Amino acid sequence: MNIEANQEQFLEDLSLLKKDLTTALKSVNVEKYREEYKGRFSAERFKEYFVEKIAIHTVFKYVLIRMIEESMGRVKVKLNEKGLNHWHEMSKNFRRDYNVLYKIAESDVKREKDLSEIFIDTVYDEEEFSDRTLKVLSKHIPLLAKYNFKTMDAITTLTLIDNLYSPEKREELQSFYQPSIIINFLLKEVGLI
């Protein structure tokens, strides 16, 4: 499906992914990360910001993997309809385990020397978070597979970023806690930093 021609639906689908990620992460305990923010942020605000940054990091990582697979053609496609069909044919026991397929797609991208630095794991990828985010992603992967990321131009990318990571949120979260290389890379690519 052409992203540019179906931009509104595409933005809705990715907004729903972000919302579901945020919901899944709300029960996680992030108090151990708050030490240097005590006195500056309440526990509630710190958690809200931290969860928001994990959700944005996760969505942007998915988008970058799809762009690298399809637009750049650097690795074999796994997360579009063709990739999912191949996965179903190849793996009878893991057909619906899209979290496994996602990990393979991410590993493929990490093996590319010039891209590996972008995909270095950060605090936002720690196991306690990635377990939850992978469960959410595995539900959304078949829904998002219909989109052709070759049709995602710079304007659509900018619109997506503004929709999911508004200028107000960017101002609040960009310097919050640790940087996300994924977020920073995508912002830099569209000229926002």
Image (spheres, grey):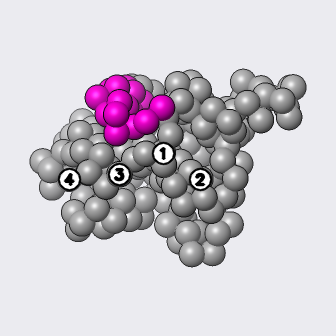
Magenta-drawn stretch contains 104: no
Specify few, some or many for label 4: CA neighbours under 10 Å numbering under 14, 14-19, or 20 or more. Answer: some
Q: Amino acid at mark 1?
A: Phe
* Spatial separation of the CA atoms under disc 4 and disc 2: 27 Å
Q: Amino acid at mark 4?
A: Arg
* Spatial separation of the CA atoms under disc 4 and disc 1: 24 Å
8 up-or-down from 36: above or below: above
Specify few, some or many for label 1: CA neighbours under 10 Å numbering under 14, 14-19, or 20 or more. Answer: many
Please give the residue where the numbered disc 4 appears in the rendered image: 170
Q: Amino acid at mark 2?
A: Glu
User: 192 and 55: which one is in front?
Assistant: 192
The earlier-in-sequence mark between 4 and 1 is 1
Q: Label for residue 149?
A: 1
Q: Nearer the viewer, mark 4 or mark 2?
A: 2
Specify few, some or many for label 2: CA neighbours under 10 Å numbering under 14, 14-19, or 20 or more. Answer: many
Specify few, some or many for label 3: CA neighbours under 10 Å numbering under 14, 14-19, or 20 or more. Answer: few
Q: Residue at x 71, y 48 (%)?
A: 104
